[in-house]
Image (cartoon, rainbow, N blue to C red):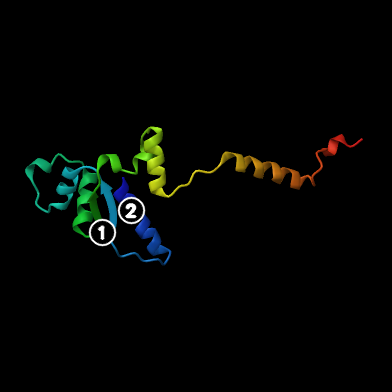
Amino acid sequence: MVACDIMWLKKMLKDLGEHYDGKVVMFYDNMSSIQLASNPVYHARTKHIEVHYHFVREKVLDGQIDLVYVKTNEQVADIFTKALGKDKFEYFRDRLGVHEMDVMSLRGSVENASSETTGGNSETAGDST
């Protein structure tokens, strides 16, 4: 539950001496959920809703969380929760600011590091005769 995690992180930051009093923005792709959480009027039809949804509503009404609508195909969090096609994955990855690394540069670094630790000598300690 994201709202609970947000409240936990805010408390942990406070315990560490870093106070954050602003609203935390949560992006939802469901307008009905946003309207239900933002509406302070209790409706008889909402009594079947699970308890953790009432927690979100309470935090929205307290001004601790702000719910913002985002289109379903723009929901960047899907990169962590769904199997995506290459194009969608790369789009979300770029939106998160993650850059693709060249695999060959990693191999070169590993090879260079191993030759440096052996002093450039390919013989092992057991091979010296």
In screen coordinates, is 37 left or right of 98? left
Amino acid at dot 2: Ile
In screen coordinates, is 70 left or right of 102? left
Amino acid at dot 1: Gln
Query: Would you identify the image quadrant in which residue 48 lies?
Result: top left
Tell whether label 1 touches label 2 (CB within 8 Å).
yes
* Front in this rendered view, residue 50 or 32: 32
Q: Which residue is mark 2?
A: 6
Q: What is the quadrant of the N terminus in the image?
A: top left
Residue most toward the right?
129
In screen coordinates, is 31 left or right of 10? left
Q: Residue at x 82, y 38 (%)?
A: 124
In screen coordinates, is 83 left or right of 101? left
- Which secondary structure lies at badge 1? loop
Horizontal and vertical percent position of residue 30: 21, 42
Q: Residue at x 30, y 43 (%)?
A: 75
* Front in this rendered view, residue 118 or 85: 85
Q: What is the quadrant of the C terminus in the image?
A: top right
* Front in this rendered view, residue 33 or 92: 92
Real-space CA distance between mark 2 and mark 1, rounded to the nearest whole angstrom: 9 Å
Q: Residue at x 28, y 51 (%)?
A: 26
Checking the image for residue 64, the label placed there is 1
**Disc 2 residue crowd, few under 14, some 14–19, many 20+, Cα 10 Å:** some
Horizontal and vertical percent position of residue 106: 61, 42
Task: Mark 2 or mark 1: name the one nearer the start of the chain.
Answer: 2
**Disc 1 residue crowd, few under 14, some 14–19, many 20+, Cα 10 Å:** some
- Which secondary structure lies at badge 2? helix
Query: Would you identify the image quadrant in which residue 17 lies?
Result: bottom left
Q: Is residue 22 above or below residue 81?
A: below
Q: Residue at x 38, y 40 (%)?
A: 79
